[in-house]
Image (cartoon, grey):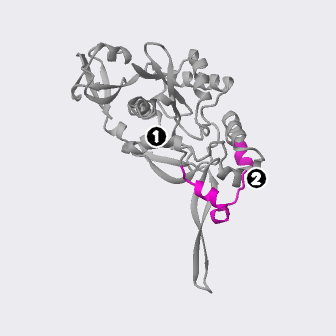
Amino acid sequence: MLALRPVALSDLPQLLRLAGARLLGVTSLVDDETCLREKILDSLASFAKVEARQGPENYFLVLEDQDSGQLHGCSDILATAGFATPFYSLRNRPFVSSSRELNIEHAVPTLSLCQDLSEQTLLRSFHVDPALAGTPQAQLTSRARLLFIAAHPWRFADTCISEIVGYSDEAGQSPFWAAVGQHFFDLPYVEAERLCALQGRGFLAELMPQYPLYIPMLPQPAQDCIGRIHPAAREACDILVDEGFAPTQYVDLFDAGPTLQARSNQLRSIIQSRVAVSYLSPQSGQGRHWLLSNDRLQGFRAIVVPLDEAPGDVIGLDQAMLQALQLTPGEPVRGVAL
């Protein structure tokens, strides 16, 4: 059985493997040992924080095979985007100009550097092994973050965002980067993406133009990238859209991939999840899949399992399910149907 749990320092070697296989553009999961170690230590400190309020915390979760100890995926939650370092985006909105003499008003779409999305909770670092694509375990890796937020709402903002990786070709070339970023950085997309992963986005804002970019003046291939999703990022996007996220006017600085946003009180796994009392009951493995978690902090666990009966005030779980959630009968379980 696969379970999502908080990361441990001993996971570092396996995380290096996951990071090496990540989709280009997932800058929050870099295949660098020093950066990953710092990310793990930051997560450990975040889970250990007793004070329950929103701050700079990063909650990093890994998908583990309970029998072998093998990691098959990961995801994390940054409680407050822009808390420690500025969180930059490109805002896509029209610039309106008018002439009274000619009685003409014209709107031209532009992209402007901004920090509008600061102070919102950021879902990031989603990755699963290719064999798990399209499975309930992929949904577990993404959606269990929302059960964690539901259990600890004071640690997070009222609004969540997630950046979806934008389009690049099989050779790792981004038409948007080639038309915009490369003129200011003189770096290929792959190198710029890695530099951002290692050093953050601060250097990007220092060199990016501070004035609006007029979209019609960009080459057509670059215009076509604005808000376009990388094919390999479609599942990550679809899971969040199914939860209640929606595209916004904001896109990524590098590849112009879309930024999704939603109020926490509109997300399905938050508003529809219910807490029930567990009891030991054999399961046939043939029922509907449910996303389940305990409501702990450091001991957080989440699984996806088929249940013979929909939970009410009580929920029947077999011994393997209870063990994966690190619960004993009588303890509470949070659940939502997939």
Q: Which residue is mark 2?
A: 183
Q: Quadrant of residue 17?
A: top right
Task: Left or right? Give the position of 42 relative to 290.
Answer: right
Per the image, is 141 magenta?
no
- Badge number at residue 161: none
- Measured as percent of width and height from the top left, residue 138 is found at 44, 32
Q: Which residue is pictured at 49% across the width and 22% down the height?
A: 6
Residue range corresponding to the magenta coloring: 202-228
Q: Amino acid at mark 2?
A: His
* Residue 110 sits above or below residue 178 on the image: below
Q: Is residue 61 visible?
A: no
Q: Which residue is pictured at 67% across the width and 65% down the height?
A: 217
- Measure the alpha-carbon separation of dots 1 and 2: 32 Å
Between 158 and 215, the one lying in front of the other is 215
Q: Which residue is mark 1?
A: 235
* Residue 91 sits above or below residue 328 on the image: below
Between 6 and 159, the one lying in front of the other is 6
Residue furthest to the bottom? 101
Q: Which residue is pictured at 70% across the width and 48% down the height?
A: 205
SS for tag 2? Answer: helix
Disc 1 packing (10 Å; few <14; some 14–19; many ≥20)? some
Between 282 and 167, the one lying in front of the other is 167
- Measured as percent of width and height from the top left, residue 115 is found at 61, 49
